[in-house]
Image: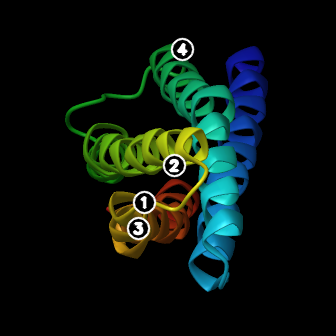
């Protein structure tokens, strides 16, 4: 059981690194004034989503499940664990895909604009869209909730 706990802790660090590597550039992009800087930051965030955030979340979910199974916790009747699973599922199946769609859209339009050597109106509209900002921030806000559930086990 302690092996799964250690692996889960490492996976959580991986997931946190992924959140930081994705959300911080998104926040910086929305504060930047120049379109080129915004596009570069969003492209960086989109690359980090596939390299850090997605694998970190998957590793965290799998090692957490393995740890819970090794500890013989009831995954369906333990209230705090069900709530934690629900918040994690919300992050993994709703917030993360919507964040990724928004980031990929900006990246594609930035590449098209680079090929045309000018900022296109579509890129300007995509950068004005707040989808990556909103869903990245929602992922960040769910982390303290998940920590609270796992540490204090309120129900």
| First along the sequence among labels 4 and 1 | 4
- Residue where numbered disc 1 is placed: 120
Q: CA distance from mark 4 to mark 1?
A: 54 Å
| First along the sequence among labels 1 and 2 | 2
Which of discs 3 and 2 lies nearer the camera? The answer is 2
Q: Which residue lies at the image location 74% right of the left edge and 22% below the top edge? A: 7
In the image, 74 versus 40, the foreground residue is 40
The image shows residue 96, relative to residue 2, as above or below, that is below
Rendering coords of residue 6 (x, y %):
79, 26
Residue 138: assigned label: 3
Q: CA distance from mark 1 to mark 2?
A: 6 Å
Quarter where residue 15 is shown: top right
The image shows residue 12, relative to residue 125, as above or below, that is above
Query: Can residue 19 be spotted in the picture?
Result: no
Q: CA distance from mark 1 to mark 3?
A: 29 Å
| Residue at the limit of the structure toward the left, as seen here | 77
| Discs 1, 2 touching: Cβ within 8 Å | yes
Asked which secondary structure carries label 4, the reply is helix
Q: Is residue 77 left or right of residue 11?
A: left
- Residue where numbered disc 4 is placed: 70
| First along the sequence among labels 3 and 2 | 2
In the image, 92 versus 82, the foreground residue is 92
Q: CA distance from mark 2 to mark 4?
A: 51 Å
Q: CA distance from mark 3 to mark 4?
A: 31 Å
Q: CA distance from mark 3 to mark 2?
A: 29 Å
Q: Quadrant of the N terminus?
A: top right
Query: Can residue 109 be spotted in the picture?
Result: yes
| First along the sequence among labels 2 and 4 | 4
The image shows residue 27, relative to residue 151, as above or below, that is below
Colour scheme in the image? rainbow
């Amino acid at each position: 059981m302690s092996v799964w706990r250690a692996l889960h802790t490492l996976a959580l660090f991986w997931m946190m690194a992924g959140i930081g590597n994705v959300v911080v550039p998104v926040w910086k992009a929305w504060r930047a004034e120049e379109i080129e800087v915004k596009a570069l930051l969003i492209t960086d965030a989109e690359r980090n989503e596939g390299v850090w955030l997605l694998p970190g979340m998957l590793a965290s979910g799998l090692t957490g499940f393995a740890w819970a199974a090794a500890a013989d916790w009831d995954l369906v009747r333990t209230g705090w664990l069900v709530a934690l699973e629900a918040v994690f599922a919300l992050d993994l199946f709703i917030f993360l895909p919507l964040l990724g769609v928004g980031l990929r859209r900006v990246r594609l339009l930035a590449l098209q604009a680079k090929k045309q050597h000018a900022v296109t109106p579509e890129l300007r509209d995509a950068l004005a869209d707040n989808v990556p900002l909103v869903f990245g921030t929602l992922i960040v806000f769910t982390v303290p909730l998940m920590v609270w559930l796992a540490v204090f086990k309120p129900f």
